[in-house]
Amino acid sequence: MTETTVFTPPDEPAGTEERTADVLPFPLKKDTDPAPAPELPAESVVKPGEWEAELPDTDDPEAEGLAEGAPVDPPREVYPPSVAEWMEAKDKARMAVLPDWVKLPDQRKAVRRWAVRHYSAVAGYHAVRLPCIYTPKVLWYSPRGAWRWSAAIGRWVFDAEGKSLRLASVANEDAAEYLKLSRQRNDRV
């Protein structure tokens, strides 16, 4: 059977019409006892921003809580290897000149079959995309590219970059400057 606890708020004293909140005590779960708060002496209360730790007494070698043991990260003991050990390590690390699949005929056939399958699939993929994706893209972008290319070539041929300087030297009637700019244009073009 379940028990239902109904909370009824206490009667309010007169003159407390303006309330901001009600504090409701929630019932504890069944089969739980509230843990009493530990009572601490006033001098052991830790304030916010402070910390407290119990450290063992280092003067007493018999102190409890001290554990002597091996270092956490012991230094590696590296001894110089003998020549035989050194050669053996180099032999193990050496890679074969030819991989195993090149040496064995069955492996060569398997690799050849895989390569034919792989590259035929890649070629088929692009063969399907050629008429329906690649060709329309080329037809769409090629006029714009041709226009950009011809405009860049025209600017280079007619030296559009130096035209304003040449016209300014003509307007100022500076023949020496104009001749210098003309020679520079002829050298560029």
Image (spheres, helix red, strand yellow):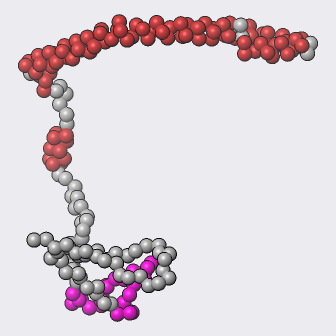
Q: Nearer the viewer, residue 69 or 96?
A: 69
* Residue 32 in view of the camera: yes
Quadrant of the frame with the N terminus: bottom left
Magenta highlight on residue 109: no
| Picture coordinates of residue 168, whole percent (x, y) | 85, 16
* Residue beneath the point at 38% across and 87% down: 45
Task: Kindly identify the residue that appears in the image at 38 percent across and 93 percent down.
Answer: 42
Question: Given the current orientation, which residue lies at the most extreme left position?
Answer: 106
Does residue 148 appear to the left or right of 46 in the view shown?
right
Q: Residue at x 49, y 77 (%)?
A: 17
Q: Quadrant of the C terminus?
A: top right
> Which quadrant of the figure has residue 133?
top left
From the image, give the main secondary structure of the stretch colored magenta.
loop
Q: Is residue 66 visible?
A: no
Toward the front, the furthest residue is 14
Q: Is residue 48 above or below residue 2?
A: below
The picture quadrant where one finds residue 129 is top left
Front-lying residue, 189 or 121: 121
Give residue 123's position: percent from left, percent from top.
Answer: 27, 11
**Magenta run includes residue 44:** yes
Give the residue at x 23% y 82%: 35
Write down the quadrant of residue 114 in the picture: top left
Q: Is residue 186 left or right of residue 17?
A: right
When the figure is inspected, residue 78 is found, relative to residue 133, above or below; the finding is: below
Please tell me which residue lies in front, 73 or 152.
152
Give, as a single range, the part of the protein colored magenta: 41-64
Q: Horizontal placement of 178 versus 69: left or right?
A: right
Residue 122 picture location, percent across and down = 26, 15
Q: Is residue 122 left or right of residue 148?
A: left
